[in-house]
Image (spheres, rainbow, N blue to C red):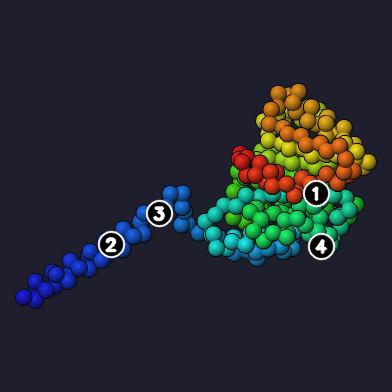
Amino acid sequence: MRLTISLWMLAILLAAVSCSRNSTDTLPSGEDTDTTGFIPQPVGVSFQKVNHPKDVTDYVLQIPASYNEKKTTKWPVIIFLHGIGERGSDLNQVKRAGLAGIAGQDPDFPFVLIAPQCRENGWWDAPSLNILYKEVLEKYNVDSSRIYLTGLSMGGYGAWDWAQYAPQNFAAVAPVCGGGTPSKACVLKSKPVWVFHNADDPTVSVQLSRDMVKAIQDCGGTLVKYTEHPTGGHDAWTKAYKDPALFEWMKAQKL
């Protein structure tokens, strides 16, 4: 009798274990439970230091509100390069500038935003920015195939320069009222590029953007887009960064 009861209890125990396994072994499609190495981050906007700075000092970081909850999500990244007026050591200036200022008003902005600051009297330097790029990949839970680059004015020059220096870094590039090097444009012929400029820009000639777009097209590039407004002066970035179409376009691009 004792043997019969023991066998009956063992059968119940095995059935319970089997049910427990069946309830957890099958994961939803595309789900990954590996959170090894996940490091929680301060959500929202914060100021961060580059570990090995050269011509880049510190940077403004914006983390989506659900970042720490979605530990297995690999987030897309936008790197934003500011204009000449935000150089120096006060990250509050960068925080208010261009895309950083617009995205900072949206806690659910669906990208990790990185906005470095250029040194006082400095200029954007691609090798230095590559140090920051490597740090972003190592420190944050991001998708290396969905990193996007944009910048305005001096940052537009910087975006062109960095994209031409290391096109393999970016899934797409969106330079705003800047200028690049047409003789090196062919490295971007297979890269999604969306260029913005105003025709009446008194600070950076619209011809610089036109020349870059034409140079890419002359190399056989078919993925370049160009938005030119007839008026607006130097500020081509407010319309560009407030247009949801830009971010939908970015999300559609992947290395």
Whichever of labels 4 and 3 marks the residue nearer the N terminus, that label is 3
Return the residue found at the far front: 230
Q: Position of residue 135 (x, y in %)?
A: 67, 53
Closer to the chain start, of discs 4 and 1, is 4
Q: Quadrant of the C terminus?
A: top right
What secondary structure is found at the residue carrying circle 2? helix
Name the foreground residue: 226 vs 148. Answer: 226
Q: Which quadrant is the N terminus positioned in? A: bottom left
Q: CA distance from mark 4 to mark 1?
A: 18 Å
Please tell me the numbered disc located at residue 27: 3
Q: Provide the secondary structure element on which disc 3 rests.
A: loop
Residue 81: assigned label: none
Q: Residues within 10 Å of mark 3 (few under 14, many from 20)?
A: few
Tag 4 residue: 92
Res. 231 image quadrant: top right
Q: Is residue 50 above or below residue 9?
A: above
Residue at horizontal 34 percent and vertical 60 percent from the top: 23
Q: Which residue type does callout 3 highlight?
A: Leu
In the rendered structure, find residue 19 and report the number of the disc placed on it: 2
Q: Quick check: 153 left or right of 60? A: right
Which amino acid type is shown beneath numbered disc 4? Asn
Q: Secondary structure at mark 4?
A: helix
**Visible in this render: residue 165?**
no
Q: CA distance from mark 1 to mark 3?
A: 43 Å
